Amino acid sequence: NAGVTQTPKFRILKIGQSMTLQCTQDMNHNYMYWYRQDPGMGLKLIYYSVGAGITDKGEVPNGYNVSRSTTEDFPLRLELAAPSQTSVYFCASSRGLGNNSPLHFGNGTRLTVT
Amino acid sequence: GENVEQHPSTLSVQEGDSAVIKCTYSDSASNYFPWYKQELGKGPQLIIDIRSNVGEKKDQRIAVTLNKTAKHFSLHITETQPEDSAVYFCAANAGGTSYGKLTFGQGTILTVHP
């Protein structure tokens, strides 16, 4: 199993451009998440999904959109990139939402907006 | 919502010494407390977790303790080795309607000097 795979690994965007961060998992997990990681701030939840067709906002959803058309894929969309979205983005998945289901993370996408 | 504070932000030890990282949380309904290790260029990986029905859990050189009354939990690494150098994150799940979603601490950069 590859686990959670994120692409691209790195990306530089100009202000106002748009892009989609891709995330796919091969563990047949129902739950998927997007976090952003900023220095000294830990990981903040952007959006999460409890299954295909169902998504919900996390702690910092502004400026982002998600979709979940299949169990495997959970892309994150930035429509109008802003410097404040410079960050490292992590996708994760879990079998459940409870305390017996640890998160499995991808290796991240480092995004710079200039 | 849940708030998790983690200290210290950086920790430097000599090989063979012990390292302790502490976290406090705010939501008294939280009942799941995982610890993640993040190596350079990788996503966080679960190393140990504890549930609120136990006070301590050990796995070889790492242990976690939980004090629900004081709402704090700690990670203990004994006989540290250079490969323990990484960023460590604590987390807590949010109880009530947000059950299951994790809130992360700010992270601790641990450096083990040979």
Image (cartoon, coloured by chain):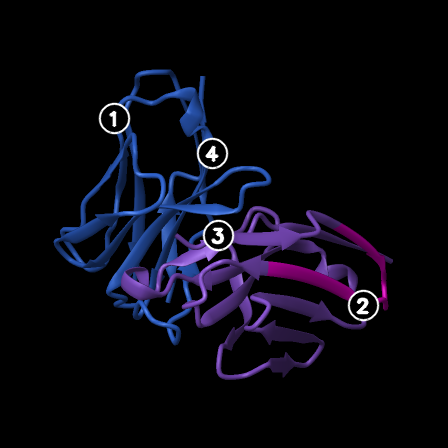
Chain colours: A blue, B purple
Going by the numbered disc 3, the residue's amino acid type is Asn
Q: Residue at x 31, y 67 (%)?
A: A97
CB contact under 8 Å: marks 2 and 4: no
Q: Earlier in the sequence, mark 3 or mark 2?
A: 3
> Is disc 1 placed on a helix, strand or loop?
loop
Q: Which mark is residue A79?
A: 1
> Dot 3 corresponds to which residue?
B3
User: Mark 4 and mark 3, same subunit?
Assistant: no
> Dot 4 corresponds to which residue?
A87
Going by the numbered disc 2, the residue's amino acid type is Ser
Report the Cα–Cα distance between label 2 and label 4: 32 Å
Residue B69 quadrant: bottom right
Residue A84 quadrant: top left
Which chain's residue wears label 3? B
Report the Cα–Cα distance between label 2 and label 1: 47 Å
Going by the numbered disc 4, the residue's amino acid type is Ser
Report the Cα–Cα distance between label 3 and label 2: 27 Å
User: Mark 2 and mark 4, same subunit?
Assistant: no
> Dot 2 corresponds to which residue?
B18
Q: In the image, which is nearer the foreground, mark 2 or mark 1?
A: 2
Please state the extent of the stretch shown in magenta in the rendering: B11-23
Going by the numbered disc 1, the residue's amino acid type is Glu
Which chain's residue wears label 2? B
Residue A103 quadrant: bottom left
Q: Quadrant of the N terminus of chain A?
A: bottom left
How many C-alpha atoms fall within 10 Å of the one at disc 3: few (<14), some, or many (≥20)?
A: some
How many C-alpha atoms fall within 10 Å of the one at disc 2: few (<14), some, or many (≥20)?
A: some
Which chain's residue wears label 1? A
Residue A93 lies, with reference to residue A81, above or below; the image says below
